[in-house]
Image (tube, rainbow, N blue to C red):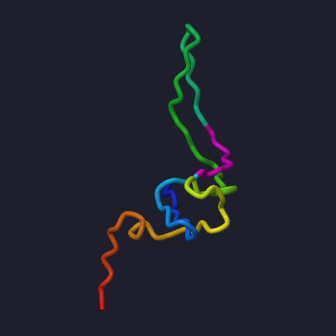
C-alpha cells in the first residue's frame, strides 16, 4: 500500500507526523501444537486516515498531502 507524504505549511515539516488510521485486516493465523502463532497472510480489506498532526508544531490544521518527489527532493520537473 502506497502511503502519502505530508507537509505542514505552518512550520515546513516534511518528516514527522502522527497519523491515526482505522483499518480492517484479514489475517491467517497458524498455531503450532505448542500454542505459538505465526501470521502467514495479512490482507488489508479497508483503510482510512482519520487524522494527521504535525510532530513539530503539534496540530493538523495546516497539514497537506504532497507529491512523493517533493518529499524526497527528487522533483525532476524542468526549471525555467
Predominant SS of the magenta segment: strand
How many numbered dots are placed on residues in this image? 0
Q: Position of residue 57 (x, y in %)?
A: 59, 58
From the viewer's side, name the closer residue of 64 and 49: 64
Q: Residue at x 50, y 70 (%)?
A: 66
Q: Position of residue 18 (x, y in %)?
A: 60, 51
Classify the position of the C terminus by image quarter: bottom left
Q: Which residues are magenta?
A: 18-26
Q: Residue at x 55, y 55 (%)?
A: 56
Is residue 17 covered in magenta? no
Q: Quadrant of residue 52?
A: bottom right
Q: Position of residue 40 (x, y in %)?
A: 50, 31
Is residue 22 covered in magenta? yes
Q: Is residue 35 left or right of residue 14?
A: right
- Which residue extends farthest bottom? 80
From the viewer's side, name the closer residue of 58 and 2: 58
Reply above or below: 34 against 47: above
Q: Residue at x 57, y 18 (%)?
A: 31
Q: Position of residue 3 (x, y in %)?
A: 51, 57
Amino acid at each position: 500500500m502506497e502511503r502519502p507524504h505530508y507537509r505542514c505549511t505552518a512550520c515546513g515539516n516534511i518528516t514527522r507526523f502522527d497519523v491515526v488510521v482505522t483499518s480492517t485486516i484479514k489475517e491467517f493465523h497458524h498455531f503450532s501444537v505448542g500454542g505459538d502463532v505465526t501470521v502467514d497472510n495479512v490482507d488489508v480489506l479497508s483503510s482510512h486516515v482519520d487524522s494527521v498532526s504535525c510532530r513539530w508544531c503539534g496540530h493538523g490544521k495546516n497539514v497537506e498531502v504532497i507529491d512523493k518527489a517533493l518529499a524526497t527532493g527528487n522533483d525532476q520537473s524542468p526549471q525555467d
